Image (tube, grey):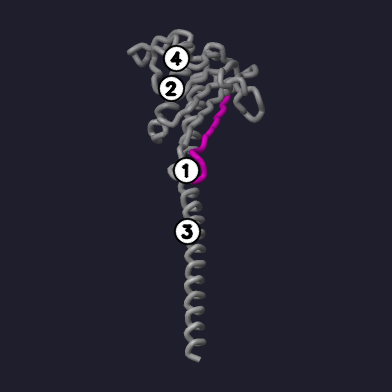
Amino acid sequence: MSRLGHHGGRRLGELRRGQRGVAMVELAFVAMLLLVIVAGTFDYGFAWRSGLAANEAARTGARVASGQAKSPGADYYALNGVRASLVASGQIANVRKIIIFKSTTANGAVPSTCTATTPTGTCNVLNGTQLQALSSSSYSLVISTDPTVAPTGTGCLLTSAAMLAGWCPSARVNNPQASADYVGVYVELWYKNQFPVLGSGTTVRRTAVMRVEPA
């Protein structure tokens, strides 16, 4: 009896240790799953915040470009607005591409030629470095020190200041009695995941389109 009791107790102890081992393995799987969920939620939230910043920058640029219409300073002020908005939101270093384009589709989509690696078409395309480096000398533009004097020149981006300079403000149509152009601003940011369990990051894209207003 004593030997049976001894063996039975040993088997019971082994069974309990085995159960504890299974429980630890299950806990490890659950903890790993929870970690992935928490990390994913964290990065999704910050990517969503980047989307809000990109949306605000695009709307700022489109609003300014629309109101400036054919003014030589249209792109100068529009891109300054985009840059200031992105600086304020802390996203300026994450800019991949900014596009000012002539919108010709009902859904306001950016022409594929403008988003190509080598862009072409009726649009102005800048990368993040070019956006940060912009100044009044990046345009065919003269801005007076007197704020009551309007800028002069064509307002065209210089080809040396952008990936593509293909749509000067002077070429835009703002006749309310005719088919006025629609100007679009596209903002593309890169959000780098803080917890790369779900990938290295996310490309955030936002577009705003507005009708070019009468001067």
The residue carrying mark 4 is: 161
SS category of the residue bearing label 4: helix
Amino acid at the residue labelled 2: Leu
Distance in Å between CA atoms under marks 3 and 4: 51 Å
**Marks 1 and 4, the one that precedes in the sequence:** 4
Distance in Å between CA atoms under marks 3 and 2: 44 Å
Distance in Å between CA atoms under marks 1 and 3: 17 Å
- Residue farthest to the right? 106
Distance in Å between CA atoms under marks 1 and 2: 28 Å
Within 10 Å of disc 4 (Cα), the crowding (few <14, some 14-19, many 20+) is: many
The residue carrying mark 3 is: 31
Give the camera-side residue of 111 and 38. Answer: 38
Are discs 3 and 4 less than 8 Å apart at CB? no
Q: Could you tell me residue 57's position as x and y percent? A: 47, 31
Amino acid at the residue labelled 4: Ala
Residue 164 located within the stretch drawn in magenta: no
Q: Which label number is shown at residue 131?
A: 2
The residue carrying mark 1 is: 196
**Marks 2 and 4, the one that precedes in the sequence:** 2
**Marks 1 and 3, the one that precedes in the sequence:** 3
SS category of the residue bearing label 1: helix
Are discs 1 and 4 less than 8 Å apart at CB? no
